[in-house]
Structures are given as structure tokens and as C-alpha cells.
Amino acid sequence: MEIKWDERGLLPAIVQDAQSGAVLMLAYMNEEALRLTLETGEAHFWSRSRNELWHKGATSGNVQRVRDVRVDCDVDTILLKVDPAGPACHTGEYSCFYRTLTDE
Amino acid sequence: MEIKWDERGLLPAIVQDAQSGAVLMLAYMNEEALRLTLETGEAHFWSRSRNELWHKGATSGNVQRVRDVRVDCDVDTILLKVDPAGPACHTGEYSCFYRTLTDE
């Protein structure tokens, strides 16, 4: 399957808890991040703010064991189903989507 | 809450089935799409391929009733929880993520 990387060489990757079904976060992958994710079985991303490869949980210990890697119909978005070792969010929240749009 | 639109004035929006928890699709919103989504209670997006506003289901009838609009910690991604009236995918599949990366 031919993956359609965007003009930056990136793809959005949705991370979903394989057990609860909760959407945990959205991050971006480049080709190396996807390769390392598949090779190691742990989620890797490309940090657009730090401009570097990012092994999720390398510092915090909150790694994400990958159970399933799905692609959408256009092959331009990834869905990772994971078992998270801890909170997905840097705020300490279980999911990055802990607020509704109308919250303060 | 100050939404962080990207350099194109867009945001990725993850669409999740409010009942089953399945991730259905990822699309993009501009400010008008978000406003119309909030005003009408039905998902609207910005089509990057057609370069136009897109009321999901306007043609197919497969509208998505919006139950919850969440934002992530960085306020640069939207999570819509919806009740879909039919398949999310233009292929007729319930979810756009019907294939694993290793499928043909």
C-alpha cells in the first residue's frame, strides 16, 4: 500500500486506547517514525515543535504498546490502537482531549 | 479558548462514533466549518481536494449528528463524537480505517 505523505513528509496519526476505545491524542509521523513504530512495537512520532524524532514515553515511561496499525481509505492518516503504560497527555491527563470546546 | 489554526487556516478533526467508540474518519475544518458544525449540530468540514466547504452527508444522506466537540491540550485538534446516519467512508465502509497497514 502506497502511503501518501504530505508535502512535509508527515502523516497525522490518531492514537486510540485498544481496550477502552478512547481517543488519546493526535501526533505526526514521518517515514522513520512509522518504521520504528513497526520495528519496536512502541509508538514513535515526529515532533513538529522540537523538529525531532520522538519515542513516546522515552522520558516519562508512558510508552504506548502498539496493538494494531490501521490506515484510512486515502492512505493519508494512520490509526494506532495501543495499550498505554500511563497518561497520553503531557498535562498528566489520560487523554489529550480532556476539554470540551466550550470549557474556559 | 484560543484555537490554533494551522498556516492554511485548518485543523484536523477526528470523528468518533459516540456509541461504539470507533474512529470513523479524519477530516479538516476551517473556521466556517467549525461554526456551521456548532450552529447546525451536524458535521461540516473543509475539503482540501475540492477546496470547498463540505456538509458531510449533504449528498449521501449520511450526516453525522454531533454529540460532543472536544479539543486537545494544544487546542490544535478537534475530536467530534457523533451519531452517524450511515457509513462514514465514501467506499461504503462504516469507518474509513477498514484496512490494516499490511493489507494489499
Image (cartoon, coloured by chain):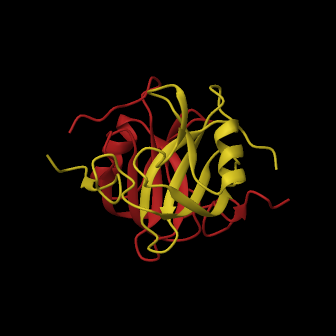
Chain colours: A yellow, B red
Q: Is residue A55 above or below residue B22?
A: above
Return the x and y of residue B53 as percentages of the image width and height: 48, 40
Q: Is residue B16 visible?
A: yes
- Image point 75% across, 43% down: which residue? A3
The answer to whether B94 is drawn above or below residue A92 in the figure is: below
Residue at image position (62%, 26%) is A8
For the C terminus of chain B, the image quarter is bottom right
| Residue at left offset 39%, top offset 48% | A60
* Residue placed furthest toward the left: A104
Q: Is B32 placed left or right of A41 in the picture?
A: left
Residue nearer the viewer, B8 or A13:
A13
On the question of residue B57 being in view, the answer is no
Q: Is residue B37 left or right of residue A36?
A: left
Q: How many numbered circles are shown?
A: 0
Name the spot of residue A101 as percent of width and height, x first.
25, 49
Q: Nearer the viewer, residue A2 or B31?
A: A2
Q: Nearer the viewer, residue A83 or B66?
A: A83
Q: Residue at x 42, y 76 (%)?
A: B19
- Among all residues in the image, which is located at the extreme right? B104
> Is residue B42 or residue B98 the one in the foreground?
B98
Image quadrant in which the N terminus of chain B is located: top left
Above or below, B83 relative to A86: below
User: Residue A102 location in percent, x, y?
Assistant: 19, 50
